């Protein structure tokens, strides 16, 4: 097989922070079963496969697998894979790369921070705050009742939960059986509050849980952050129809991450999520 692969840290201000990702260069001739086995062996929250090293219909064909399943879109694999294509496959500076994902074409813009434009958001059901609080082992008063608990999707459905403060964020402990009963299966859980960790650089802090994807807690997730960005402007959380904020995530599991959000609402809501990427290792799959 002898496929090159790379380990990168995404949404990481420095190496060994953020969310780690394995990017495999090749795999177009491998079966879905083999791709899934490789992702399981890697055992990161996601592993990506760059199937084309030349543009096809304006982008590079990429597939994303968790250890247990294929997903149509995920944020940190999009940024991390675009970084690898630029630095390891093209080996030359470019301003923009588009990934052909199962969810659609996702463009990535290069600079000090890599930015991806996500799919237009959709907004789903709102849930009872008291029921959700109990699934998180919190009190109803820990939730910010000025804003709804709501399902949002920019490719992957996510339940966005506004909390009052960092103390409530740190005390979250998910009862997964109850959560599935309340929210239904297949929804990631993203909780956030308007405080940073120890005077950190973020405007907000967040935690993401994805038990259905085999990820009890994720250090950084661009798809859920995109849902949060859409939520913030939809409900004017910061009092405006546009935002430019930074979100801290991953502190609770020792992988501090920083996600950049730029979003505006006009005729439609445009969601951009950004982050820095650090190369960790170059390897070969045999």
Image (tube, grey):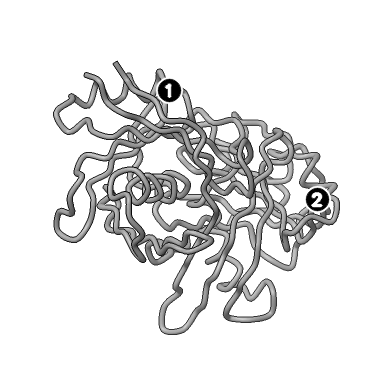
- Of 94 and 81, nearer the camera is 94
Vertical position of residue 237 compared to residue 216: above or below: below
Q: Residue 192 falls in which quadrant of the image? A: bottom right
Q: Would you place residue 100 above or below residue 243 in this image?
A: above
Q: Nearer the viewer, residue 189 or 27?
A: 27
Q: Depth check: 86 or 197 in front?
A: 86
Q: Pinpoint residue 90: horizontal percent, then vertical percent.
A: 28, 50
Identify the secondary structure beneath mark 2.
loop
Mark-to-mark CA distance, 2 and 1: 30 Å
- Left or right: where does residue 62 sit relative to residue 209? left
Residue 241: x and y in percent read 58, 81
Residue 285: x and y in percent read: 32, 20
Q: Earlier in the sequence, mark 2 or mark 1?
A: 1
What residue is drawn where x is 22% and y is 56%? 59
- Give the image quarter of residue 225: bottom right
Q: Is label 1 in a helix, a strand or a loop?
A: helix
Query: Which quadrant holds the C terminus?
Result: top left
Q: Is residue 267 left or right of residue 101?
A: right
Give residue 208's mark.
none
Residue 197 tag number? 2
Q: Is residue 56 above or below residue 234?
A: above
Classify residue 199 as left or right of residue 8. right
Give the quadrant of the N terminus. top left
Residue farthest to the front, as pictured: 92
Q: Position of residue 218 (x, y in %)?
A: 59, 37
Pointer 1 residue: 42
194 relative to 96 in the view: left or right: right
């Amino acid at each position: 097989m002898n496929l090159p692969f790379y380990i990168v840290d995404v949404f990481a201000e420095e190496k060994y922070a953020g969310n780690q990702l394995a990017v495999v260069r090749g795999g177009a001739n491998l079966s879905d079963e083999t791709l899934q086995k490789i992702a399981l062996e890697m055992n990161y929250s996601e592993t990506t496969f760059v199937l084309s090293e030349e543009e096809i219909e304006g982008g590079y064909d990429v597939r994303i697998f968790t250890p247990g399943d294929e997903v149509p879109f995920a944020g940190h694999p999009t940024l991390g894979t675009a970084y690898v294509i630029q630095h390891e496959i093209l080996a030359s500076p470019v301003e923009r790369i588009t990934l052909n994902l199962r969810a659609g074409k996702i463009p990535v813009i290069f600079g000090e921070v890599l930015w991806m434009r996500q799919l237009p958001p959709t907004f789903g059901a709102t849930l009872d705050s008291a029921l959700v609080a109990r699934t998180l082992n919190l009190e109803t008063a820990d939730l910010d009742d000025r804003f709804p608990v709501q399902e949002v999707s920019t490719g992957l459905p996510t339940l966005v939960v506004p909390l009052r403060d960092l103390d409530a964020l740190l005390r979250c402990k998910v009862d997964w059986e109850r959560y599935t009963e309340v929210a239904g299966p297949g929804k990631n859980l993203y909780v956030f509050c308007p405080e940073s960790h120890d005077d950190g650089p973020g405007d907000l802090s967040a935690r993401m849980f994805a038990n259905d994807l085999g990820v009890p807690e994720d250090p950084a997730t661009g798809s859920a952050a995109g849902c949060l960005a859409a939520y913030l402007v939809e409900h004017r959380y910061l009092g405006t129809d546009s935002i430019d904020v930074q979100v801290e995530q991953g502190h609770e599991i020792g992988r501090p991450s920083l996600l950049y959000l730029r979003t505006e609402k006009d005729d439609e809501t445009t969601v951009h999520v950004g982050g820095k990427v650090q190369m960790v290792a170059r390897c070969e799959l045999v």
